[in-house]
Image (tube, coloured by chain):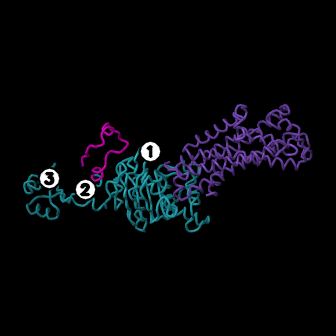
Chain colours: A purple, B cyan
Amino acid sequence: MITVELVKLCRRPRTWVSLFLLCALPATIAIFLAVTKVGPAPGEEPAFLAAVLANGSLFPAAALAIVLPIFLPVAVAVIAGDSVAGEASSGMLRYLLIRPVGRTRLLVAKLIAIVAFVLLAVVTVAVTSYVIGISLFEAQPGATVTTVSGVSLTPTEVLVRTAGALVYVAISMLGVAAIALFLSTMTDSSLGAALGALAALVTSTALVTLDAAAAVRPYLPTRYWLAWIDFFRDPILWRDIERGVALQAVYVVVLLAAAWANFSTKDVTS
Amino acid sequence: MITTRILTKRYGPILAVDSVDLSVRSGDRYGLLGPNGSGKTTLLRLILGLVYATSGEIEVMGASVPRRVRDVLPSVGALVEGPAAYGHLSGRANLMLFDRAGPARGGGGRRARRGRVLEALERVGLAGVDNRPVKAYSLGMRQRLGLAAALLNAPRLLVLDEPTNGLDPQGIREIRNLLSELNAAGTTLFLSSHLLAEVEHLCTRVGVIDRGRLVLEESVETLRAPTGRAVVRTPDIDRAAALLDGRIEARSGDRLVVRHSDPAELNGLLVKAGLRVAEIGAERRSLEDVVLQVTSAGSDRVDEWSRHDDSRPSQAS
């Protein structure tokens, strides 16, 4: 069933369209930057964009900062929201269940396909933006890069830290994926599930910046999303990264358990 | 093959299936009849473990459903409420994926799978299908594809909801022949339909469901047994009526309904009296008569009385 889900993911045009769009946004920004040479002031959002003008090999980090707040979560929510609800609305859910595919197994296969998509998306964005970065900007493959903390990094260190940041961003997306997957087992409408997950994220983002909501802040799914930047400090600031991973793990475990409990006892009437 | 005991399914306030005791025997061609919304599809979903019963028991091939449904489903093929497929893939790709999703019968290798898929496509008359995506298929082609998916398992039990939906008359006959062949080879057929003629042609046993209750379960032969009356058509209607005086139940045009259990003997009687007989035969009830007698209007018809009064107007038969 896992193979089937991965094949389905690869053969669905939607997967490739969303990947293309994810790569197109950083590319557009890179072209504007390269043509005008007008960068944002250092320290301004999105992170790293100011540094890119000096060194193109930092562009993957800048690209992550560009897609992380909206594009990436939207793509993940759409794919995850569609996972069970899409099967239900196409009528395939009943046929898969009487094939038979166990309900738990179906859910696990869906989750693995979503994780595969997240990894694929993050890696694709990083690779394309690296290529764009070194071809549009001053490429200094051998030169050192200055971290957020002001210390210089060798190219190998940049590579390792970028990889760490990529993994962290992928993990950050798992919370969204789990919310969307859970909602996807509740409804037969993929759109409803995706929008529900996005609504949860927007709420979370709004509350993170609200001082009055400080009491719940540490538990919000988007609270530690920006901690991937800490990979580019020297030394790496592990505190928020660890908390972020733990928080996502809690979201994934709780929501998956809820999704499983709901789906395995549900009447499939679609 | 399938046994249910006081099976009940409630969706909120709606009683979809109400204390059904159904029995499908091995080798049967069982037709489940009933008006729209009478609970046919819900009953099928219960039997396949898609929805869970409120109370009662289900047993399929000796295994209790839904607890052990996964043990029996590999030898069940089903079509529930219309075929489904991934629209952007071809029919063949759909079947390949569908085959791979479940437990492999007769080898999980790519070659074995290809063979199985081709065999299923051949059986339903789609062997020459090209690589068009399913969304470009006609209704009839989708129906055939759905049947092919049901046949992938080489099932011992076929559960089919409206199997000939969307097919043209040739297609209907083709599928009927296919189902007869499969049944002759040992597959038990359990199909639901509201097409009485289809069931009359294909099935040996029928169950009639009305408002969630199984109101009749009988062999087609018994249902269609002679009524003890004979129907005669004769140009000499007046003389025939005089001859059979006292035994005439109805008369219209050149047609007489006579209380007589042996049409051959009746024919001899008429001919001996010098009457010309155009047509003679034992009267049989049609399945339509039987079903209309025991069921009410479908749930898609909403009359005023149905909101106030639960008693239903008797149907002419």
Amino acid marked by disc 2: Arg
Confirm whether residue B131 shows in the render: yes
- 1 or 3: tag closer to the N-terminus: 1
Q: Which mark is residue A241?
A: none
Vertical placement of residue B1 versus A255, above or below: below
Do residues under tags 2 and 1 come within 8 Å of each other at their CB atoms? Answer: no
The one of A188 and B115 positioned closer to us in this rendering:
A188
Q: Position of residue A56 (x, y in %)?
A: 85, 41
Q: Chain for mark 1?
A: B
Please tell me which residue is depicted at 34% across the width and 62% down the height of the picture.
Answer: B204
Binning the other alpha carbons within 10 Å of mark 3 as few (below 14), some (14 to 19) or many (20 upward) gives: few
Q: Which of disc 2 and disc 3 is earlier in sequence?
A: 3
Tell me which numbered mark, 2 or 1, is placed earlier along the sequence: 1
Q: Residue at x 62, y 56 (%)?
A: A4
Q: Is residue B197 left or right of residue B1?
A: left
Are discs 1 and 3 located on one and the same chain?
Answer: yes
Q: Which residue is mark 1?
A: B12
Give x and y (percent) for residue A195. Answer: 61, 39
Q: Which residues are magenta?
A: B289-317
Three-letter residue code for mark 3: Glu
Both labels 2 and 1 in a single chain: yes
Secondary structure under tag 2 reads loop
Q: Nearer the viewer, mark 1 or mark 3?
A: 1
- Residue tagged 2: B285
